[in-house]
Image (tube, rainbow, N blue to C red):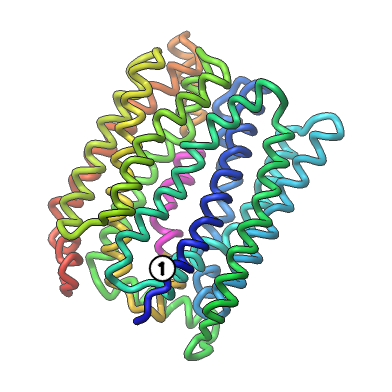
Amino acid sequence: MKSNFKKFLLLWTGELISSIGGGLTSFGLGVYIFQQTGSAASMALVTLLGFLPTLLLSVPAGVLADRYDRRLLMMIGDGCSALGIIYILICMMNGGASLAQICVGVFVSAVFSALLEPSFRATITDLLTKEEYSKASGLVSLAGSARYLFSPIIAGFLLTVSDVKLLLLIDICTFFLTVISAAVVRRGIGAKAAEKKEAFLQSMKEGWKVLCAKKGVLMLVAVSSGITLFLGMFQILAEPLVLSFADAKTLGVTETVCACGMLVSGLILGVKGLKGHYVDIMGAALIGAGLFMAGFGLFENIVPICVFGLLFFAALPFANNCLDYLIRTNIPDEAQGRVWGLIGFLSQSGYVVAYAVSGAAADALGKISGRGVGRGAALVVIIAGLCLSATALLILVSKSIKALEYNQEA
């Protein structure tokens, strides 16, 4: 197979820019909502409504990625997702956006974004050789980390001279760049037509059969859903934890420092990649991530929070890289889109539970203890971190997961 790594880099650059823009919006809306409501539950509600369409539509979006032009689907998803952000911006320019209006805008944006993920992952398989998967996965993790590395510090400083409307405007502008990069790649390699046009439901069933063909893949997806539950709790509660005793600028610097761990790991993986021991590395990385997450919640001080946060983010790209490689190399190319859609739906279902309960739990624990929402969030983060480490042990003891590394049938 001919490598198209330069075309992948162009596509990756567009997603990097999109990630930065999305991070600006996420950070700005998080600070805006916390300042308006003082509630972790309100922040969690917005995150849940922004995530739920992506989860529910991931399976049909995966089927579409196998049936139609993947690059065109990426262009539609990226371009139309700007509509929700534009709606929020208009509401704010007319006197301020309510929590309900923000929820509507985020929901609309997420509906179109759901088209993007399966098509983007399947496009990587279209473009690259098997030997380049690990390196590409490292770069994809790096692009994903940009919303935590660059966006918070940029947003934190911009909020000292302007307000959230500027962040939304910048995010809207980034959508044009990502659509253009997808269009250029599409023109360069053309559309990859599906070999056969199955009925839509039949195509979904075939994807499920492929997913279930290897017990290890199904086991890995099941464990991943538990892992996303605990990661989602951290994702929701890290900001209110810090904002309870610091301002937005400090939060931005803190998030950027923590995300430097992901930058370093992403660069290492992007340049070197991994050559083996994927199961062992993934299990060890997730155990470490859980312990570092627990450490993040122990202190009401920026310095140890930054140290533990940096170590936490440094561990994640190694786990993601191994997970991506083990699944990608055990799925036939022609079923990549629909299977990634199913995997996204199943593995990320834990986020729904996390977003639904973590904010309310932090508010309740803060009220019961009398120490406020910040320490309530910290207690939930500590518990979630310890549970993450315990769950990761299942990866190291599962024979069916270990068999995936050698493409065996266990």
At x 48% / y 82%, what residue is drawn?
202
Q: Is residue 327 above or below residue 307?
A: below
Residue 134 image offset from top left, x and y in percent? 30, 61
Left of 264 or right of it: where is 280?
left
* Dominant secondary-structure state across the stretch colored magenta: helix
At x 59% / y 44%, what residue is drawn?
22
In reply to whether residue 353 is colored magenta, the answer given is: yes
State the residue in front, 208 or 72: 72
Going by the numbered disc 1, the residue's amino acid type is Phe
Q: Which residues are magenta?
A: 343-356
**Residue furthest toward the front?**
6
In reply to whether residue 206 is colored magenta, the answer given is: no
At x 65% / y 27%, what residue is drawn?
158
State the residue in front, 54 or 17: 17
Residue 204 image offset from top left, x and y in percent? 47, 76
Left of 90 or right of it: where is 136?
left
At x 52% / y 16%, what residue is drawn?
244
Quadrant of the rendered structure where residue 209 is? Answer: bottom left
Residue 72 image offset from top left, x and y in percent? 61, 72
Assign the N terminus to one quadrant of the image: bottom left
Mark 1, residue position: 5
